[in-house]
Amino acid sequence: IHEARPKPGGLNEYGIASYKTVDGFAQAEVDYVTAIGGISIELGKSLGQGLHLDQLTGEYDAVFLGIGLGGVNALRAAGENVSGVANAVDFIAELRQAEDLSALEIGRRVVVIGGGMTAIDAAVQAKLLGAEEVTICYRRGREQMNASAFEQELATSKGVNIRHWLQPLEVLSQNGKTSGLVLEYTGLENGKLVGQGHRLTLAADQIFKAIGQTLEDEHVDGLTLTGGRITIDEEGRTSHPKVWAGGDCAAGGDDLTVTAVAHGRDAAESINRTLRG
C-alpha cells in the first residue's frame, strides 16, 4: 500500500470528526486488517509525488486506486484567498492529529459554507472548541442538504445555526484578515438555482469551505473519466487493463465508507480472478 499521509487509515484517520471515531479507531482497523500478514505500507507516497501511474502499471501486475478526492472546490467568491478562509477537510484533519486542542486557532464568529457531513463536522467541532457563533450557510433548502436530518439536528443541538438558500459572493477583510462574508439569497426558477439579488452580510473572523471535493485528474492521466471521476465497471475495472479503482475517486458510488470498502472487496476478487486466468 502506498499511502500519501504520515499515517495509514485514509478518511477514517483524517477526515471524520474526532467525537465520532474515538480511542484510535482508525489505527485499530488498520492493525486488524494488516494482522493477516503479507501487507506492507509505505507512507508519504502519493501519485504525482514520487509515484506515477505508468510506473506502477509497469512494476505491478495489478493496481488499485483508492485515492479519494484530493482537490477542494473554490467558493468562487471575491476575496476568498485572505487569511481566515480555510478548507473544512484540512481543519478536521488538523484537529484529529492535534495533541494540544488549545493550540488550535478558532474564530469567535465562524461561518461554514456547505451542506454535507463535512460542513456539519467542521461546524460542530468549531462550536465545541469555543467559537461563540457558528453558522452553516447552504445554497439550497434543508431537504437538499447531503447531511442527514440526524446530523443537522445534532449540529443545532450544539448551538450551530443553519441557514438555507444563501450563496457566498464576497469575503470581507481588514488588514488581510477575514472580517465578514457577503451572501446572496437564492431560489429555484424553472428548476435552476439562481440568485435573487438580495444580499446579507455576516460578521466572520473564520470561514470554512465545505462545498465538495474534486479528483486531481492530472494524476490519473490516461484513464477514462465520467463526471470528473474514474470510470469503472461493476467489478471496479478502469479503462486500463491493469488498473482498478474504488471509493470516492470512482464514478457512480455513494460517498460512504461502507461503499468504499465494498469497492475494495469487489476489486480484490476481480483482480484475483484476472491474475489466476
Image: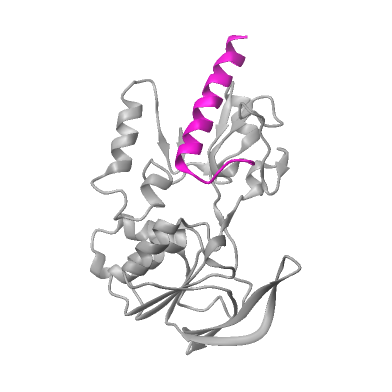
Q: How is the image coloured?
A: one colour
- Above or below — where is 234 with respect to 154? above
Q: Nearer the viewer, residue 90 or 176?
A: 90
Q: Quadrant of the C terminus?
A: top right
Number of callouts in the render? 0
Residue 276 magenta-highlighted: yes
Q: Is residue 276 above or below residue 107?
A: above
Residue lying farthest to the bottom in this orientation: 174
Q: Residue at x 26, y 49 (%)?
A: 22
Q: Is residue 109 magenta?
A: no
Q: Residue at x 42, y 82 (%)?
A: 205
Q: Is residue 240 above or below residue 71?
A: above
Q: Quadrant of residue 47?
A: top right
Q: Position of residue 143 (x, y in %)?
A: 54, 62
Depicted 99 relative to depicted 156: above or below: above
| Camera-side residue of 234 and 230 | 234
> Toward which corner of the image does residue 50 lie, by quadrant?
top right
Residue 199 at x, y percent in the picture: 60, 87
Percent of width and height locating residue 30: 34, 34
Q: Residue drawn at (50%, 31%), measured in percent from left and top? A: 262
Q: Is residue 157 left or right of residue 211?
A: left
Res. 116 in view: yes
| Outermost residue to the top | 277
Is residue 104 visible in the rendered image? The answer is no
Q: Residue furthest right?
A: 190
x and y, in percent, of residue 70 in the image: 54, 52
Magenta stretch secondary structure, dominant: helix
Magenta part of the protein: which range? 251-277
